[in-house]
Image (cartoon, rainbow, N blue to C red):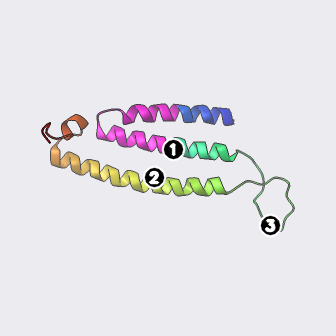
Amino acid sequence: METLIVILVGILVSIGTYLILSRQLLRIVLGASLLSHAVNLLIMTSGGLKTGSAPLLGEKVATYTDAIPQALILTAIVINFAVTAVVLVLCYRSYQKFGTDDMEQLRGNEHE
């Protein structure tokens, strides 16, 4: 199962890198979001995909599930959502002001 998730992470990283290297702003934002999801999956996989009971102190349990990677990923998802929303608003305002979403045209004059 972990091998399958690592392959999925590799696919997400390659698609995200491809989208970031494109010229449209929306594709760049979606590529960054995909890279963030790939990192979240990688953190979850490195934490281990174990099944077990909750880590309670009063019980004598042989196997338990570590909650730290899950808490880190939940925080990363919320931060990624907020950053993506802000960047999408910036892209929309840039499109309204300049009338294009092409990065080559948004560079400005060549004399600047």
Residue 11: x and y in percent read 52, 31
Q: How many numbered circles does the render carry?
A: 3
Q: Identify the magenta region.
A: 11-36
Which residue is at 61% across, 35% downward? 6
> Label 3 near label 2: C-beta < 8 Å?
no
Against 38, residue 89 (above or below) is: below
Q: Secondary structure at mark 1?
A: helix
Q: Mark 3: which amino acid? A: Leu
Q: Mark 2: which amino acid? A: Asn
Q: Secondary structure at mark 3?
A: loop
Q: Mark 1: which amino acid? A: His
Q: Residues within 10 Å of mark 2 (few under 14, many from 20)?
A: some
> Label 2 near label 1: C-beta < 8 Å?
yes
Is 84 magenta? The answer is no
> What residue sits right under mark 2 in the picture?
80
> Label 1 near label 3: C-beta < 8 Å?
no
Which residue is the extreme one toward the front? 111
Which residue is at 85% across, 58% downward? 61
Q: Which mark is residue 57?
A: 3
Q: Secondary structure at mark 2?
A: helix
Q: Which mark is residue 37?
A: 1
Residue 111: x and y in percent read 12, 39
Residue 62 visible from this viewpoint: yes
